[in-house]
Image (spheres, grey):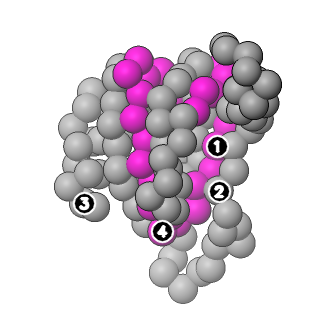
Amino acid sequence: MDEAKNQIKAKPSRYAIAGSWSAELLPRKPYCATYRPDVPVVGFAFDGQTGVHAFGSDRKTDFRTKPNSLAFVPAGCDVYSTSNQGGEYLRLTFARSRNDTWPCSRRFMTRSTRSRLLRRSSFGVSS
């Protein structure tokens, strides 16, 4: 997984550290990323994105994220995500001491259009 992290870091981005917090602004470019974060990650998508992703499993699903959406991935959750267009994305992490536990262990995303796309496809309506 470290190799995948290095692939993400190798892309041009803006990065800042303030105490235990770090922020990384990923550019609006196509991407394919596979990683397992050591710490929880909060993400903010400035742009809408479409692509394929999988969290904590190998079951890949299509996604369509609205602009200005928020996501959370807990520490240790396997992530796969790819998009042919990408979108500007802010990635925030907070490092705690090794003995601390993380209170949130499930990923979440703000409501995306994925559920609407699934409903449309079940009624034979194309997007």
Does any portion of residue 24 appear in the rendered image? no
Label 1 residue SS: strand
Q: Nearer the viewer, mark 2 or mark 3?
A: 2
Label 3 residue SS: helix
Magenta span includes 114? no
Which three-letter amino acid code belongs to the residue tagged 3?
Answer: Asp
Magenta span includes 69? yes
Q: Earlier in the sequence, mark 2 or mark 1?
A: 1
Label 4 residue SS: loop
Q: Position of residue 5 (x, y in %)?
A: 29, 51
The residue positioned 52% from the left and 24% from the top of the image is 50
> Distance from label 2 to label 3 (Cα)?
21 Å
The vertical placement of 94 against 65, above or below, is below
Crowding at dot 4, Cα within 10 Å, few <14 / some 14-19 / many 20+, comes out as some
Which three-letter amino acid code belongs to the residue tagged 4?
Answer: Gly
Give the magenta part as a residue range: 63-90
Which residue bears the numbered disc 2?
107
The residue positioned 59% from the left and 19% from the top of the image is 48
The residue positioned 73% from the left and 16% from the top of the image is 125
The residue positioned 30% from the left and 41% from the top of the image is 8
Q: Earlier in the sequence, mark 2 or mark 4?
A: 4
Q: Earlier in the sequence, mark 1 or mark 4?
A: 1
Q: Position of residue 82 (x, y in %)?
A: 40, 35
Q: Earlier in the sequence, mark 4 or mark 3?
A: 3
Label 2 residue SS: loop
Q: Position of residue 29 (x, y in %)?
A: 35, 20
Q: Earlier in the sequence, mark 1 or mark 3?
A: 3
Q: Name the quarter where the N terminus is drawn.
A: bottom left
The one nearer the camera, 75 or 65, is 65
Does any portion of residue 64 appear in the rendered image? yes
Which three-letter amino acid code belongs to the residue tagged 1?
Answer: Ala
